[in-house]
Every structure is written in structure tokens, then in C-alpha cells.
């Protein structure tokens, strides 16, 4: 297992470097002065642009620039956002926690719901419920998530004023403690629900396929031949095997879900990365956009790494095949 | 060919999607060439709910929503198809070369496509477009950049499978040069899954363009469904029709291309189920 | 006279799919006495695997049902058993080992835990770790195997693990469905020797099912020959294999011994195995039988003694003096 983890880490390293280099290339390959990408179009104090020019060595040869860029990055210098009056890195990390606040519950619900739906459909394979799941997953795959958010908002916050439509807290009041938490939770419902619906389709489809596959495996026969009850066979033998593709599909789609969360935030004015993204586009605050890209890309690499480790923890065959390679 | 049509027609969803796409193409062409219709026309009846006069209502400037949605099909189809064609061409070239000759070329192509798989592609697209300008060409270019790896991977796999078949050696003995073999013998046999994947890329491209427009990363002069949703976002409380109809158009179109891609995939290769 | 641990009497089991009926077991009769080793041979499609699974009720009622006949295990009539009732007797008194040990073991669960499941199910008050260790040594697996995953073991070791799982239930009858087919020849011999030893030590009855005549001959006291869902010949191994009675058995043995016929070609059984969904009344072997006569296609004969052979019983018109 240890060797597997090290091998995965060794793979992640070059990818992160590649991402950083790619970001660097973007800054320099887009039409216009690279200074614009590093400073943005938002009004900045005089002399700031000159400072950035010097810090990043923009009049120096490209290789030196790359080196300086890496140095700056490693010190956490992703630039300064004047429209938000904060260093970019702090800003992005700060907002990221709010994005995670809606992402994690959504993915958890999607996972649980998807698996439950698959378990309900599996005994009646080919039946109505089963075809329903397959149909639902194509629909879920095709629906624009931001439109889904808008529809939900129209339905449940505007036409039927059950839930708050925007923001994380009600602007009119300033609450603390438990009432504040309740208010936040209430505001979370629609954004989380939008993301959940989107992902239940994908999870249910994978879960259904893997449950059906696991049920037809030979070792299920051995388990039954021992005299184990149907329930024991399901929970002890079928599910541990069936869950593996479900975990990997959620884990390896982390980037996709992050994108979905960001888009949903713009619809509900949720104060996370998505909101930051769209306001920065409006303000032409490019260092923030690049910062978001870098941070999210690295987050996805980390998520992939965690999924790899989780996968190896759940399926011992993966660990062994890796050992043999080395 | 006959078997293809038989299987294709048997897949009813594919048939319906094909019909929808054809209809959409007709709409796009008609709106492009028909003189006299002006979707940009501002009127006095702003923010009117759907009625017999305006079946889809009007927007904040009094423009007819139905016309807008119909005109929006031009952008979606244009961007979707051209991005898919571009990505397919690029992907097939790189993937076929990688699969056929292997070696460092293969390694390089695989590593690069792996990297694209990892980064959140939409965010990358948004960043590039915001930095380099919001014209349609930039958008198509960015989508091509993001979509070619999946086509390349499929092409590479197919080419690697086909190059081992005996007829390739046979043709080689006839004196055909390597790249000739690749272009005229190997690649044409790899067309089937690539075609299916290419159709799915159209769906992704339309969704990507819509998402970018939704965030405001598109030209304000061009009518696009995503852009209409961007406008509708501000008026969700008062004019639900500004968001419902354009979004529905996006959803149905993307759904149609996804189902079409599935149908093409299973019709061309009955052994595999695409999804 | 010890009693029968397994009794199958004229059992008919049908697979019904839209419109077609296929009799996987068509009046099969088979007995296994306590402590006895019985072999069941036949080609693919003869119904022997179906019989094996039926003895544990592992064929879902939706797929196939017992239409007539009777089956009893350890004195209990199981013909009309429900799933719950089957679950109560699986493992103990009857347990099963299967053909390909890799796919029949849960890949993500340690071997020791899979064995422990059997023990916990059937001997809940036994000290678990000790009992598992005991079973491991019984099947000659190293104690370290307890923490191993199936894919980390060799084919032979996995089959031993499957045996340990079956033995952990404390069965009186072990049904072994092609237990050595997936193994190489040397390992086959080891596993057979192990099964023989276990039988002697535990006094377990054995129903060994295989298409490999040699294995069955060396391990079993009595043999049943099955064809197209019928048991057509049975008796002591020496009789059935030494002096075969039924034309099918004769052909089978000649083919197995790679005997040559008068023209110097390998002796084979002419024709193809029958389609179980399109059976005519009478003996299913008729189209391929060199001794076929008029009665054969009309009616399946009742069991009777074999003529000019050993003490076995056979269902064949050629062995009736009309």
C-alpha cells in the first residue's frame, strides 16, 4: 500500500508542475501584454503595475520569467485583487470554503440517493424503475446545471415562496448562534439540491450497473451456499464490491462537480468561488481568475490522489498489481 | 449500410433526436436566410408574459423571446458543429499518429491528454476566453483545445487495435508507405467510435458555449441561448419566461445530441454499448 | 445399512422461458449414503451442474422449477422448500465447492474472514480464531493465509480455501462441482488426495461431479452416468467403468481412452448432444445410439439390471430380454 501511495504521489507532482507551466503559458500566449493578466483591468494604484513588472521579470527572457513565476507561486504570491482588496491567494482560499460548504453535502446526498435507487431497482432489473434510472441519467447529463438552478429558484423561491432565493444569509437581519446556522442551512437548500439532482443521475447509473454486476458474480453463490441470509450476502459481499465504482466515479469527477458548484453559485449569489469568478469577470480582475484556476486545478489533482488511495483501500487487487509493476 | 439504418431506426430515442436535430438545422437556416425577421427589434411591450402575441413573452427591451430562441439556434449549431469538427480533426490526427507509431509521440500525446482530463476544463475555458476576447472564433478554438484529447484517446485505441490486423501487413507488402497505410487503410476502419464520440462532442460544445455565455463571456451582439439566460438571471423574480425557454432549448438540444451519439455508437457497433 | 444423506427420485426440473421448456433434469434418480463417495459424470449440457445446484436450492424459482419427483436431504423432504427453508440447511448438512476458485471467492475480503463466516454461521459458540486456524491446517494451508486476499493465493491454495469454507459449516455431504477442472494436473491430484483424506477423517459423504472420468473413477465408490437430464446408468465404479453397459457409457469410455476403431480412427460418439428444449419422448440418446430399436424412441425404459456386464443398473432397451 505504501508503495502504491508513493507511486501516485510521484505521478501527481509532475502534473502540478505542468498545470503551473500551463497557467504561465496562458498568461503569455493570450493576445496582449502579459501584464494585463497579472494585474487586471481594474484600476490599480500608480506604480503597482511597475512593481509587478519587476517582480515577475516581464522584461526578462522567458525562461527567467518562468523561474520568477514559480518562485512567486511558491511564496504564495498570486497577485493582489484590488476589486476585493485582498491578496489573491487568501481571497480564493477564503471563498473556497463556502463552495465546499455546498459541494460536500450535495455529493454526499447524491451518493446516498444514487445507491439507494440502484439497490431498489436491482431486484427488478429491466423493470420500469430500472429504465427510469437509465433515462434519468441521460437527462441529468444533458441538463445545464445553471438552468436547473434557475428553474428550481423560480419554482420554490419565487412562485412558491418556500425557500430563500439568494445569498447565504438573510440580508435584513444579523443573527448569531443557532438562528444564524438555521438561516444558513435554509439558504443552502436550493443550491445543494441543484447540485444533488445533477449528480444523482450519474451516480445512480454507475451504482445500478455495478450492483447488477456484483449480484451476478460467482462468489455470491459461494456466500449463499454457506447458508448466509439474503441480507447478509447483500451487505457483506455484494455492496463492498459494488461500491468501488461508485466511489471512483464521484472521486474522479470532482473537477466536474466543482465546476457545477461554481455555476450554481452564480445563480443563487452564494458567496463562494463561483460568485468570485463572475464578479471578477465583470471587474476584469484577471489575477483572481488565474488564481481560481490554479487553486481548483490543484484541488482536483489532490482529489484524484485521494480517490486513488481510497480505491486501493477498498480494492486490494489494485495494490498488488501496482507492486508487481515496480 | 442497411444494417446500420436498421439498428439506428430501431433505437427510437436516436430517431427522435435525429428528427429534432434536423428540425433545428432547418430553423437555423431559415432564420439565417429569411429576410424581414428582426429578433433585435425593441418594442414597447417589455417583460410581457407569454401570450398569443408573443408565445414566449418578451425580454427587458421588448424583444420577442420566441424569435430570440429560434435565432439562438444558429450560434449553438455553428459553435457545436464547428468545434466538434475541429476537435475531431485534431484528435484523429494526433491520436492516429500516437497509436500507429507509438514511442515518445504516444507518450507525449497521452500525458498531455491526461493533463487536460485532470484540470477543470470549464474554468480553464472561461479563463482563456476572458483573457483573449469573447468572439465566437475564440470560443470555438478553446473548445477544440479542450475536446481533442477524448477523440485522440479513442482514435489511438482503435488504431492500435487495427494495426495488428493482418491486412495491414498485407498492404505493407504491396509497398505502401507507412503514412499512406495509416491514412487510407487504418483510419477509415476506426471511424465508427470516432463518429459517435464526435457527436457527443457537439453536445459538450453547445453546453460549454452556453455556460460561457451565461457567465457573460460572449459577445453581446450575438444572440445565444446562454446569453439569454444571463439576462434572464437578473429578472428571475419578474420574468420567468426569460430563463425557462432559452434554457429548455439548450437542454433539449444537448439531450438530442447525446442520444444521437449513443444511437450512432450502438448502431455502428452492436457489440458495445456506448454508455 | 446407513441411511441416505441425499435422495433424488425421478426429479424433473424445467427451465421455462417465453414459450420454450427445457428439462435440465428429466426423471433423474440419485442416492448418496452417509459417508459414501458418489461420482456423477456426463458431458456439458447433461444436467449435472443443474443437479449440483439444485441440491442446495441455488436455482431461483423464477428461472427453473421442480415439476415432479422428489428430493430429500438428510431425511428431510426439500422438494417444495422455500428460500428461507433452503437457507436453513445450506452449509449444514449439505455444503458445496465450486469450479473456478478465483471467481468464487470474494476478491475484497480476506480469506480468513470468509472462512470465519461459515464458522460463525454454523458453530456460533466455537472459538472463532482457533477454529479457523484448525480448518486451515485441515486443508493444508499455511496459517498466514488467514490474512491473504484471494488473488494473492495460487489456484490450488484457493481451492483449498473454498474447501475450508465448505468444511467450516460442518457438512455431512459435500457436493463438489468440477472442483479440479480449473487446476493444472499436479494440483488436481493434490486436491483429490486432500478430499479423500478429509472424507476419511470427517466421515463426510461426497458427491463429485465431473466430466473427467479419471478423477471420478479414482475418488468415488459408486458412479452415476447422466445424459440429457436422465441418469442412465449407475453402480459400483469398477462395474460402470470396467464393464460399461449403456451404449453411451461405452462410447464415453472409448473416447476417453482414445481408443481406435477398426479403421484406425479415434472412436467417437456419432451425432451431437441433444437440444434439451426439443426432446421427443423416449430415450434421448436414440439418434446417436448404435443399438437403437423401435421402442427407444417411444418410451424411456425403467431401470433394470445390465446384461453381460457387472452388477450395475441401466436404463436401456438393449438390456431387456423382451
Image (tube, coloured by chain):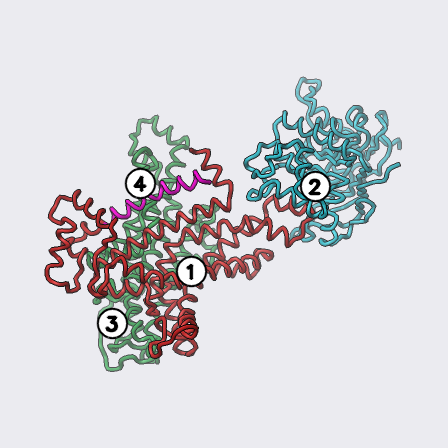
Q: Magenta stretch?
A: A1-23
Magenta span includes C289: no
Q: Quick one: label 4, few (<14), some, or many (20+) residues within 10 Å?
A: many
Q: Which of C128 and A157 is in front in this view?
A: C128
Alpha carbon distance from label 2 to label 1: 44 Å
Residue at 48 percent across and 41 percent down: it is A318
Give the chain of mark 2. C
Q: Mark 3 points at which residue?
A: B39
- Whether marks 4 and 2 lie on the same chain: no
Depth-wise, is mark 4 or mark 2 nearer the camera? 2
Q: Mark 1 points at which residue?
A: A104
Q: Quick one: label 1, few (<14), some, or many (20+) residues within 10 Å?
A: some
Contact (Cβ within 8 Å) of mark 2 with mark 3? no
Give the chain of mark 4. B
Give the chain of mark 3. B
Residue at 30 percent across and 75 percent down: it is B235
Give the chain of mark 1. A
Magenta span includes A4: yes
What element does badge 2 sit on?
A: loop
Q: Mark 2 points at which residue?
A: C168
Q: Which chain is cyan?
A: C
Side of A141 relative to C56 (left or right): left
Predominant secondary structure, magenta span: helix
Contact (Cβ within 8 Å) of mark 4 with mark 2? no
Q: Which of A320 and B163 is in front in this view?
A: A320
Q: Earlier in the sequence, mark 3 or mark 4?
A: 3
| Residue A155 appears in view | no
Image coordinates of residue A104 in percent, x first then y, are 42, 60
Amino acid at each position: 500500500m505504501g508503495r502504491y501511495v508513493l507511486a501516485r504521489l510521484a505521478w501527481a507532482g509532475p502534473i502540478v508542475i505542468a498545470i503551473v507551466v500551463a497557467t504561465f503559458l496562458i498568461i503569455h500566449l493570450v493576445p496582449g501584454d502579459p501584464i494585463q493578466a497579472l494585474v487586471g483591468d481594474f484600476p490599480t494604484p500608480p506604480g503597482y503595475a511597475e512593481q509587478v513588472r519587476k517582480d515577475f521579470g516581464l522584461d526578462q527572457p522567458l525562461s527567467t520569467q518562468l523561474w520568477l513565476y514559480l518562485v512567486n507561486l511558491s511564496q504564495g504570491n498570486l497577485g493582489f485583487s484590488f476589486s476585493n482588496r485582498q491578496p489573491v491567494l487568501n481571497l480564493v482560499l477564503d471563498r473556497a470554503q463556502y463552495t465546499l460548504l455546498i459541494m460536500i453535502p450535495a455529493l454526499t446526498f447524491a451518493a446516498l440517493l444514487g445507491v439507494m435507487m440502484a439497490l431498489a431497482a436491482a431486484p427488478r432489473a429491466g423493470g420500469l424503475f430500472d429504465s427510469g434510472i437509465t433515462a434519468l441519467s441521460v437527462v441529468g447529463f444533458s441538463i445545464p446545471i445553471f438552468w436547473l438552478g434557475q428553474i428550481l429558484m423560480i419554482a420554490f423561491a419565487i412562485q412558491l415562496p418556500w425557500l430563500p432565493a439568494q445569498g447565504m444569509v438573510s440580508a435584513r437581519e444579523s443573527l448569531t448562534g443557532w438562528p444564524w446556522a438555521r438561516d444558513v442551512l435554509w439558504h443552502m437548500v436550493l443550491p445543494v439540491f441543484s447540485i444533488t439532482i445533477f449528480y444523482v443521475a450519474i451516480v445512480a447509473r454507475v451504482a445500478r450497473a455495478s450492483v447488477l454486476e456484483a449480484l451476478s458474480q460467482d462468489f455470491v453463490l459461494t456466500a449463499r451456499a454457506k447458508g448466509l441470509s439474503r441480507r447478509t450476502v447483500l451487505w457483506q459481499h455484494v455492496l463492498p464490491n459494488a461500491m468501488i465504482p461508485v466511489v471512483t466515479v464521484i472521486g474522479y469527477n470532482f473537477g466536474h462537480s466543482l465546476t457545477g458548484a461554481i455555476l450554481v453559485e452564480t445563480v443563487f449569489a452564494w458567496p463562494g468561488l463561483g460568485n468570485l469568478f463572475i464578479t471578477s469577470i465583470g471587474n476584469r480582475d484577471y489575477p483572481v481568475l488565474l488564481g481560481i484556476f490554479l487553486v481548483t486545478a490543484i484541488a482536483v489533482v489532490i482529489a484524484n490522489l485521494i480517490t486513488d488511495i481510497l480505491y486501493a483501500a477498498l480494492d486490494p487487487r489494485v495494490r498488488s498489481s501496482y507492486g508487481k509493476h515496480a | 449500410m442497411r444494417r446500420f439504418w436498421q439498428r439506428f431506426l430501431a433505437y427510437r430515442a436516436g430517431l427522435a433526436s435525429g428528427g429534432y436535430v434536423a428540425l433545428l438545422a432547418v430553423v437555423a437556416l431559415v432564420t439565417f436566410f429569411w429576410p424581414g425577421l428582426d429578433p433585435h427589434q425593441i418594442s414597447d411591450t417589455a417583460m410581457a408574459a407569454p401570450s398569443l402575441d408573443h408565445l414566449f413573452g418578451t425580454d427587458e427591451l421588448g424583444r420577442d423571446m420566441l424569435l430570440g430562441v429560434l435565432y439562438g439556434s444558429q450560434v449553438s449549431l455553428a459553435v457545436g458543429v464547428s468545434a466538434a469538427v475541429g476537435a475531431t480533426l485534431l484528435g484523429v490526427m494526433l491520436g492516429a499518429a500516437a497509436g500507429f507509431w507509438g514511442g515518445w509521440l504516444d507518450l507525449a500525446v497521452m500525458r498531455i491528454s491526461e493533463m487536460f482530463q485532470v484540470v477543470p476544463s470549464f474554468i480553464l475555458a472561461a479563463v482563456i476566453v476572458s483573457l483573449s476576447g469573447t468572439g465566437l472564433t475564440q470560443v470555438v478554438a478553446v473548445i477544440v483545445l479542450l475536446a481533442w484529447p477524448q477523440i485522440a484517446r479513442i482514435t489511438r485505441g482503435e488504431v492500435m487495435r487495427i494495426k495488428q490486423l493482418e491486412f495491414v501487413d498485407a498492404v505493407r507488402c504491396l509497398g505502401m508507405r507507412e503514412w499512406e497505410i495509416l491514412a487510407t487503410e487504418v483510419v477509415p476502419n476506426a471511424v465508427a467510435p470516432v463518429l459517435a464520440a464526435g457527436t457527443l462532442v457537439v453536445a459538450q460544445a453547445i453546453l460549454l458555449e452556453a455556460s460561457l455565455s451565461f457567465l457573460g463571456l460572449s459577445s453581446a451582439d450575438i444572440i445565444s441561448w446562454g446569453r439569454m439566460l444571463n439576462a434572464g438571471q437578473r429578472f428571475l423574480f419578474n420574468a420567468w419566461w426569460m430563463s425557462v425557454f432559452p434554457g429548455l432549448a439548450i437542454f433539449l438540444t444537448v439531450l438530442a445530441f447525446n442520444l444521437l451519439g449513443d444511437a450512432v455508437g450502438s448502431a455502428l457497433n452492436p457489440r458495445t454499448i456506448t454508455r | 445399512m446407513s441411511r441416505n444423506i441425499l435422495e433424488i427420485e425421478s426429479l424433473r426440473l424445467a427451465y421455462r422461458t417465453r414459450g420454450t421448456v427445457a428439462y435440465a433434469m428429466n426423471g433423474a434418480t440419485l442416492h448418496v449414503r452417509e459417508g459414501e463417495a458418489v461420482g456423477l459424470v456426463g458431458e456439458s449440457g447433461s444436467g449435472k451442474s443443474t443437479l449440483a445446484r439444485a441440491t442446495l436450492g441455488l436455482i431461483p424459482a423464477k428461472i427453473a422449477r421442480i415439476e415432479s419427483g422428489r428430493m430429500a436431504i438428510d431425511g428431510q423432504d426439500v422438494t417444495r422448500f422455500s428460500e428461507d427453508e433452503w437457507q436453513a440447511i445450506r452449509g449444514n448438512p449439505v455444503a458445496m465447492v465450486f469450479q473456478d476458485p478465483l471467481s468464487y471467492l470474494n476478491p475484497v475480503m480476506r480469506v480468513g474472514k470468509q472462512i470465519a463466516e461459515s464458522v460463525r454461521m454454523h458453530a456460533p459458540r466455537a472459538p472463532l480464531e482457533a477454529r479457523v486456524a484448525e480448518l486451515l491446517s485441515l486443508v493444508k494451508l499455511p496459517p498466514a493465509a488467514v490474512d491473504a486476499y484471494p488473488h494473492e493465493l495460487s489456484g490450488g491454495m484457493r481451492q483449498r480455501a473454498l474447501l475450508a469454507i465448505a468444511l467450516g459449516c460442518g457438512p455431512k455431504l459435500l457436493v463438489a462441482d468440477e472442483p479440479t477442472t480449473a487446476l493444472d494436473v499436479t494440483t488436481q491430484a493434490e486436491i483429490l488426495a486432500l478430499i479423500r483424506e478429509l472424507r476419511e477423517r470427517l466421515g463426510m459423504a461426497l458427491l463429485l461431479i465431473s466430466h473427467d472420468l479419471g478423477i471420478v473413477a479414482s475418488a468415488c465408490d459408486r458412479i452415476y452416468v447422466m445424459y440429457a437430464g436422465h441418469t442412465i446408468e449407475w453402480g459400483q465404479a469398477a462395474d460402470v467403468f470396467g464393464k460399461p453397459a449403456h451404449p453411451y457409457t461405452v462410447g464415453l469410455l472409448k473416447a476417453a481412452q482414445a481408443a481406435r476403431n477398426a479403421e484406425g480412427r479415434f472412436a467417437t460418439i456419432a451425432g451431437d448432444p441433444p437440444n434439451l428444449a426439443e426432446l421427443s419422448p423416449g430415450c434421448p440418446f436414440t439418434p446417436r445410439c448404435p443399438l437403437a430399436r423401435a421402442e427407444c424412441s417411444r418410451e424411456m425404459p425403467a431401470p433394470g439390471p445390465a446384461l453381460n456386464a457387472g452388477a450395475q443398473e441401466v436404463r436401456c432397451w438393449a438390456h431387456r430380454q423382451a
